[in-house]
Structures are given as structure tokens and as C-alpha cells.
Image (tube, rainbow, N blue to C red):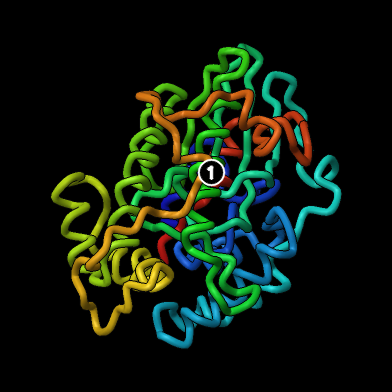
């Protein structure tokens, strides 16, 4: 994939020798970093930027994790990611382009996808069209966790994370709707969406979370919960994600927290119904699953905060949002 991206870049600029001015890595997960070794081979002088030092620390730990399980190649494991990745320190200088019609915002204020250590790039054209490059998809589907894992080696309280996530997703819809923006969301993987379809995605996610929480607080059996979610919502997620950490951060922890006394996946259904804990972002009766924007904008600022606003060329920015699968 990295070689394909480089080939497209070279065709667009009609040169095999001119390096990109920079590469921007949204976050430090292995499936987004696998092509760095190829970029270094072809363009060793091109800086590879991330939004913060936290991204670098998480990236290094994920690389060590991947290499210890042989899911990265020897060449990928040989890269010194701590020195190759550079945290933005002076973004107005580091990400400067001489192009008057496109402006760039590097954003660090949105928890999305699977990690809270992530940077987004927002592009605005002279005609007012907005593009938001997110790395991972901003709606959660069946991932169901935010990976602050490498800070403390302990996953965050899973239900608290889901409740906050619901609010953040709703806030992002509100912000994208401000000013009637014509916005297109372009994740490295996951569906491309506009403001309307993204709002529908968030509404679907919120509905999933409501139902899921009722299941996890009333069952000790992750297979039962997964099968029930797929029965109700066939596009809920891939079963592979279940075994990668989606449900295991909630089952049996949620049921045990309300004294269901789980043991080896039993009971499948707790003897007494347990209402999930209160969550302001999920506990409302409204056919529209987005809370009033006025309630959310102060708690979850979204596009309003940025690290930079600088002209860039659309081509380089698109090429720079690399989602490189290691296989």
C-alpha cells in the first residue's frame, strides 16, 4: 500500500525524485504505521509528523507489541520510530505551503476511532468545502473502547468510556453542522461520509450503545451478547473485532459491577434486570439521537480548536494521510 501511495504521488507531481514536503501520521496504531519503512527507503529526508509526543510513545509500544508477535516484518521492526516520528512543535513553520486557495487545520481535540492520541487534518478550500481526514473512522462500530491502554496498562472504565464517546460523537455532529458547512469526512478505513450521512452514522452508533449497555449489564456471556447484537443489527461489526478487545472490556465487568456474579460465561442472563448506569448522552427520549448542540458544544469543543491554519496543496495533504496495512 505504501508503494502504491508513493506511485500515485509521483504520477501526480510528475517526478520520481521530488520528495513530499511532509507526511502526517494520524495515530500510532500498527495498521497505520506499516508503510513508514517504505517511505523512509524512498524519501529518507521527508519528515514524518504526528500531533504530539503521546502519539510517538503509543506508536513505539504498539510496534514492540507487534514485533513480539511477529505481525511486523524484520524491516518494519528495525525502524527507530522514536526518532523517525516527529511531534509538531512549530506547526506554522513545519507544515507551511505556498498555496492561497486551501487552508489546513491540524486538530487534536477529538477522541475518535480507537485511540484518544490522534491528530486530524482539516482542509478548507476557497469555495468553503471542508475535508476532514481522520485516520480511523470517527464512529465506533464494534470497537467499543478508547485505547489509553499504554498509559497505565489498564483499560479505562469501559462504560464511562462509552458514555463519553456517545457525547463526543454527538458533539462532532453539531460542530460539523455549524455554519452549514459542506464537509466530507475521509477516514483511512471506514466509510467516507458527508455531514448528513455522518449524523446518521452517529445516530446508529448511539442506538447500538443503548441496546448494548442493556445487554452487557444483564449477561455474563459475550457470545450471547454478540449474537444478539448481530441479530438485531446485522451491520453492527465484524466478529474479528469481538476477539480483539471489543466486548472483553465490558463482559463480564459490566454485569459483575451490578452483582450478577459471573463465572465462566454464566449466567447467560442475570436473574434480576439491571438498568445501566446513568449516562447523560444516552438517557433521553428523543427520536433524534443527537442532543441539542447547545448542550454539547461547551463540553466537547471540536473543530473550533486547532494547532494551525496554513495554506497547503490539496494533493500533498491527501497523499500524506497514510493508512498503511502492515500485511
Residue 214 vs residue 270, the one in the foreground: 270
Q: Dot 1, crowdedness within 10 Å: few (<14), some or many (≥20)?
A: many
Q: Residue furthest left?
A: 231
- Where's residue 56, x and y in %? 67, 67
- Where's residue 272, x and y in %? 26, 63
Q: How many marks?
A: 1
Left or right: where does residue 138 sit relative to residue 149? left
Say which element carries label 1. strand
- Where's residue 24, x and y in %? 63, 50
- Where's residue 143, x and y in %? 39, 58
Place residue 40 in its image quadrant: bottom right
Residue assigned mark 1 = 134
Q: Residue furthest front?
A: 272
**What residue is shown at x 44% (from left), y 33% (from top)?**
284
Left or right: where does residue 189 sit relative to residue 53? left
Place residue 78 in its image quadrant: bottom right
**What residue is shown at x 44% (from left), y 79% (from top)?**
73
Left or right: where does residue 40 sit relative to residue 208? right
Indicate the quadrant containing the C terminus: top left, top right, bottom left or bottom right. Answer: bottom left
Residue 272 vs residue 266, the one in the foreground: 272
**What residue is shown at x 52% (from left), y 23% (from top)?**
183
Judge whether residue 198 can be spotted in this image.
no
Indicate the quadrant containing the N terminus: top left, top right, bottom left or bottom right. Answer: bottom left
Residue 6 vs residue 276, the one in the foreground: 276
Q: Residue furthest bottom?
A: 68
Residue 262 lies, with reference to residue 51, above or below; the image says below
Place residue 178 in its image quadrant: top right
**What residue is shown at x 22% (from left), y 45% (from top)?**
235
Left or right: where does residue 90 sit relative to residue 103? right
Judge whether residue 159 can be spotted in this image.
yes
Residue 237 lies, with reference to residue 300, above or below; the image says below
Amino acid at each position: 500500500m505504501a508503494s502504491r501511495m508513493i506511485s500515485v504521488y509521483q504520477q501526480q507531481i510528475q517526478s520520481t525524485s521530488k520528495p513530499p514536503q511532509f507526511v502526517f501520521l494520524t495515530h500510532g496504531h500498527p495498521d497505520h504505521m506499516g508503510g513508514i519503512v517504505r517511505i523512509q527507503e524512498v524519501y529518507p529526508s521527508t519528515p514524518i509528523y504526528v500531533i504530539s509526543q503521546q502519539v510517538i510513545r503509543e506508536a513505539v509500544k504498539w510496534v514492540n507489541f507487534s514485533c513480539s508477535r511477529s505481525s511486523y516484518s524484520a524491516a518494519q521492526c528495525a525502524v527507530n520510530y522514536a526518532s523517525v516520528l516527529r511531534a509538531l512543535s512549530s506547526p506554522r513553520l513545519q507544515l507551511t505551503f505556498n498555496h492561497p486557495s486551501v487552508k489546513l487545520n491540524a486538530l487534536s481535540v477529538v477522541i475518535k476511532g480507537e485511540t484518544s492520541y490522534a491528530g486530524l487534518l482539516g482542509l478548507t478550500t476557497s469555495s468553503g468545502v471542508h475535508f476532514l481526514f481522520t485516520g480511523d473512522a470517527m464512529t465506533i462500530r464494534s470497537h467499543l473502547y478508547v485505547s489509553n491502554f499504554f498509559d497505565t496498562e489498564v483499560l479505562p472504565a469501559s462504560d464511562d468510556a462509552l458514555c463519553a464517546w456517545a457525547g463526543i460523537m454527538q458533539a462532532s455532529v453539531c460542530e460539523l453542522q455549524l455554519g452549514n458547512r459542506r464537509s466530507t469526512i475521509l477516514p483511512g478505513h471506514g466509510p467516507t461520509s458527508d455531514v448528513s450521512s455522518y449524523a446518521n452514522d452517529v445516530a446508529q452508533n448511539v442506538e447500538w450503545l443503548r441496546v448494548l449497555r442493556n445487554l452487557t449489564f444483564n449477561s455474563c456471556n459475550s457470545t450471547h451478547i454478540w449474537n444478539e447484537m448481530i441479530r438485531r443489527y446485522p451491520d453492527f461489526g465484524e466478529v474479528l473485532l469481538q476477539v480483539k478487545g471489543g466486548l472483553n472490556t465490558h463482559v463480564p465487568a459490566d454485569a459483575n459491577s451490578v452483582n450478577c456474579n459471573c463465572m465462566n460465561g454464566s449466567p447467560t442472563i442475570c436473574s434480576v434486570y439491571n438498568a445501566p448506569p446513568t449516562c447523560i448522552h444516552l438517557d433521553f427520549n428523543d427520536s433524534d439521537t443527537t442532543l441539542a448542540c447547545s448542550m454539547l458544544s461547551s463540553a466537547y469543543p471540536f473543530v473550533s480548536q486547532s494547532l494551525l491554519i496554513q495554506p497547503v496543496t490539496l494533493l500533498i495533504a491527501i497523499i500524506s494521510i497514510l493508512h498503511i496495512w502492515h500485511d
